[in-house]
Amino acid sequence: MNVNIVYMLVTLLATSIGAIAGLGGGVIIKPVFDVIGFHDPQTIGAYSAFAVFTMAIVSTYKQIRNRVKIDKKIGLFISLGSLVGGYLGDVCFEYINSNLGAGISVDRIQAGLLFIILLLILIYTLNKDKFPSYKSESAGIIFGVGFFLGIISIFLGIGGGPLNVATLTIAFSFDLKDTVVYSIITILAAQISKLGKIFLVNGIENYNLDSLVFVIVSAVLGGYLGAIINNKLEERKIEKIYIATIIALMLISIYNTTNLQII
């Protein structure tokens, strides 16, 4: 099948689900693109960053149009933390990708770490009433949460996704709908770091981005549709979509860990 069509369909589905459940889309795009195997990990990370950034802009705009209330302090400091963390996450990825020895690939490292994170998040989600939650108001803690989410999401190339939802719920005691909004804000800031490095440091000409227009168009549609659906669904239904997506991604991560080609 044509690579443009495949990338369009995957991106549309991923960003729609991402905007509905605060998953960002990249947590779906990255492992699925790995399975398809059209491009190398660095290029897939770039595609994921462009798609997630586009989705986050559209989704944030739609939420603002719907007059969703955003705590300015949390929004500001979590964005700043995610911006810095996103940059360092990409630096870590580049370093590890360039210094791996023979017999192992960065794809497998990412897939294995993603599986562990998803498993922990699933355990938390199914038992969240047993876990403490907080209402952090310190600017330093808010910044730290954003930094943590930014560095992990960019290193794994996932845009943040379910890790954002779980962490924000614990740190700020948000309900799922509020968590989705702040998750998208965090994702937006982290992707600015990633894309800034692509344009200003690495050089966009060094990436094979022939399908980029198709990915961006699909991300716009997905972000718009997902935000509309999010505002119409009950929180219980959003949580079901969230859990089902995590389980599916765990299975994909297992496949990627065991089947990706070794360098």
Image (tube, rainbow, N blue to C red):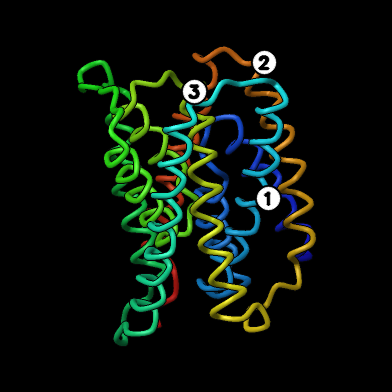
Give the Cα separation between the discs numbered 3 and 2: 14 Å
| Residue depicted at x 53% and y 57% | 30
**Label 3 packing within 10 angstroms: few (<14), some (14-19), many (20+):** some
Q: Which residue is mark 1?
A: 54
Give the mark toward the camera: 1 or 2: 1
Q: Which residue is label 2 attached to?
A: 232
Q: Amino acid at mark 2?
A: Lys
Mark 1 and mark 2: Cα distance apart in space: 22 Å
187 to 88, vertically: above or below: above
x and y percent of residue 118 in the render? 35, 43
Say which amino acid is labelled 1.
Thr
Q: Quadrant of residue 123?
A: top left
Q: Residue at x 25, y 22 (%)?
A: 133
Residue picked out by circle 3: 178
Residue 180 in the image: state x and y as whole percent. Answer: 51, 30
Looking at the picture, does residue 10 appear above or below residue 178?
Answer: below
User: Amino acid type of disc 3?
Assistant: Asp
Q: Position of residue 243 (x, y in %)?
A: 44, 29
Determine whether, in the image, residue 13 is placed left or right of residue 32.
right
Circle 3 or circle 2, nearest the eye:
3
Q: Nearer the viewer, residue 139 or 87?
A: 139
Q: Nearer the viewer, residue 77 or 23?
A: 77
